[in-house]
Image (cartoon, helix red, strand yellow):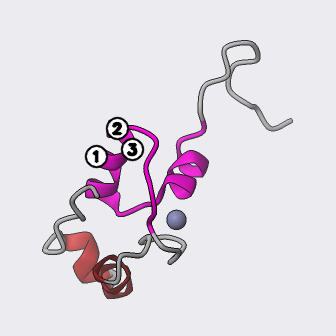
């Protein structure tokens, strides 16, 4: 398991519910169990933001080599 985020950071003072979730091993964003990460980068991101893999995938839309970034029309 990657290290959880540092709960003394200001964001967790502002949003104590996020800190509660992290202490319960849950994602700071969706409150699901954190589970596994697909790579080192994602595990490291969890240590910063407390986001699970699913939330990271949604938040950091991957670059699509064929079509580029999705653009809303
Ligand atoms: Zn999540």
Measuring 27% from the left and 71% from the top, which residue is drawn there?
Answer: 11
**Of the numbered discs in the image, which one, if any, rests on residue 22?**
none
Q: Quadrant of the N terminus?
A: bottom left
- According to the image, label 2 marks what residue? 41
Magenta span of residues: 34-61
Q: How many residues crowd mark 3 within 10 Å: few (<14), some (14–19), many (20+)? A: some
Examine the rendered structure and indicate whether residue 52 appears above or below residue 17. above
Measuring 40% from the left and 38% from the top, which residue is drawn there?
Answer: 39
Most extreme residue toward the right, as rendered?
A: 73
**Of the numbered discs in the image, which one, if any, rests on residue 44?**
1
Most extreme residue toward the left, as rendered?
A: 8
Residue 5 vs residue 72, the one in the foreground:
5
Q: How many residues crowd mark 2 within 10 Å: few (<14), some (14–19), many (20+)? A: few
Measuring 46% from the left and 42% from the top, which residue is drawn there?
Answer: 38
Residue 36 vs residue 15, the one in the foreground:
36
Q: Is residue 35 left or right of residue 19?
A: right
- According to the image, label 3 marks what residue? 42
Q: Position of residue 72 (x, y in %)?
A: 80, 38
Residue 30 placement: quadrant: bottom right
Taking the magenta stretch, the answer to whether it contains residue 45 is yes
Q: Position of residue 32 (x, y in %)?
A: 53, 74
Examine the rendered structure and indicate whether residue 45 appears above or below residue 4. above
Q: Tell me whether circle 1 and circle 2 mark residues in contact (CB < 8 Å).
A: yes
């Amino acid at each position: 398991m990657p290290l959880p985020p540092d709960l003394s950071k200001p964001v967790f003072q502002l949003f104590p519910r996020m800190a509660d979730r992290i202490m319960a091993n849950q994602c700071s964003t969706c409150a699901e169990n954190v589970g596994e990460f697909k790579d080192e980068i994602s595990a490291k991101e969890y240590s910063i933001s407390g986001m699970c893999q699913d939330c990271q995938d949604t938040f950091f839309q991957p670059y699509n080599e064929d079509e580029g970034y999705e653009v809303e029309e």
